[in-house]
Image: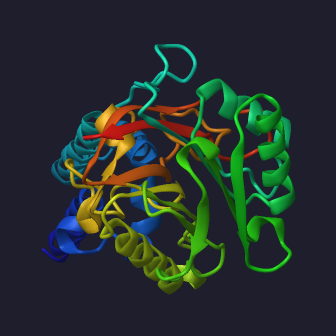
Amino acid sequence: MLARIILGIIGLAALVTLVVLAWPQAFGLEHLQGVAQLVAFRAALAAGAVVLAVLLLFGMLVARRLRRFLGFLTVVLLLFAGGNAAVLASRGFSPGSGHAGTTPVAAEADVVVLSWNTLGGAVDARTIAALALRLGADVVTLPETTAETATAVAGLMATAGRPMWAQTASHGSYPGNSTSILVSAALGEYAAIDRFGDTSIPPSLVVAPVNGEGPTLAAVHPVAPTPGNLDDWRNDLAFVDTLCSTPNTIVAGDFNATLDHLGGDPADAGDAGCTDAALVGGTAAVGTWPAWLPALVGTQIDHVLATTGWKVVSAEVIQTEDDAGSDHRPITATLTRS
C-alpha cells in the first residue's frame, strides 16, 4: 500500500512538472528559476522525453510489477514531447521567409533589420559589413560590439555606397558590455535618447529621428537569466515591454529570452505589444543560440520586434555565418508600413 502511495506521488509530481514545462506562461511561471532556463530548449526537452520514454518501455519488460506506473510515465512523456513539438511547429521551422540575398530584395519603402550578437568583437568588421551589404540592411543592431568595430563597419558600408550612422552604448571597458546600432543615412539622422531607461548589465541603446519622422529604433541586450541575475533579467524584459508600448518602434537584439518568456502568444510577443518578425515569418522555432548546435535544436533568443503600424514582409535566421566567430546566429527581418 505504501509503495502505491509513493508511486502515485511520484507520478503526480512528474505530471505536474511536465504540464508546467509544456506551457509555463499559463501559470505565470515562465520567469521562475529552473523553468525559465529549461523551457528555452523545447526541442531538446522533447527529444529527451522521447529517449526517456523508450527507456521506460524497456523497463516495463524487466520490472513487470511496475508496468502500470512505467506505462503512465511513458504516456505522459510522449504527450509532453508531442506538445512541445506542436508548439515549435506552430512557430515555424523554416530557416527563412526573407530575401537575405536569395529572393527578391526589399522594396524602397521597406526597412531591413539585421541583428547579430558578435560575442564581444569575435566577428570582424568586414564580415559584419559584408552581410549587412548583402542584405541591404537599413538598421543593424550589434549586441556585444564596441564603438571601434561599429565605426569600422559603418566606414566599410559607406565605402560601398551605403552610409550609416553608428552609435554605441557601453557599461565599462569589457567588449561584451557594449551594444551598437547602425542606421542608414537614408532614414535620416538619428540620436540617442534616454527616456526609456536601460538594461542592467549589458547596455541597450534607443535612438530616435532628429526630425521626428521615422520609427524609434532600439538595440537591446537583456542580461542572461542565470541564477544570480534573474531579478535583473526580469527587469530587463520589463524594459522591453516599455519600448513595445511606444508607438512606431522597432526593437531588435539579443533578448536572452524566447517567445515563452515574452508571453508565447501566437499573435504577438506576449503583452509587450510588439509583433515578433520570426513568428510571423514562420521561422520562430529555428535556434539562434548557440551557433554550434544544429539550428533545430538550439533556442531562439534573438528577435526583431515591431509595434502596431509595421507589417512583417520576411524573416530569416541566417545559418551561413556559423563559423564567423560568434556563438549567435544573425537574424534579419524586412518590415513595411501597414
Q: Is residue 209 left or right of residue 68?
A: right
Task: Residue at 80%, 41% (x, y): give it.
Answer: 325
* Residue 155 screen position, x and y as percent: 83, 43
Closer to us: 38 or 221:
221
Q: Is residue 207 visible?
A: yes
**Left or right side of 212 for 126:** right
Locate residue 78, reporting x and y percent: 25, 41
**Quadrant assignment for the C terminus:** top left
Using the image, determine if residue 78 lies above or below residue 246. Answer: above
Residue 3 against residue 48 in the figure, above or below: below
Furthest-left residue in view? Answer: 1
The residue at the point 24 percent across, 59 percent down is 23
User: Which residue is situated farthest in the front direction here?
Assistant: 211
Q: Residue 188 or 265: which is nearer the viewer?
A: 188
Q: Quadrant of residue 49?
A: top left
Seen at 33% across and 43% down, the residue is 56
Left or right: residue 16 compared with residue 305: left
Point out residue 315 in the picture as x, y percentages from the top left corner: 43, 33
Say which quadrant the N terminus sits in.
bottom left
Q: Given the current orientation, which residue lies at the most extreme top position? A: 103
Location of residue 283 (image quadrant): top left
Q: Is residue 322 above or below residue 203?
A: above
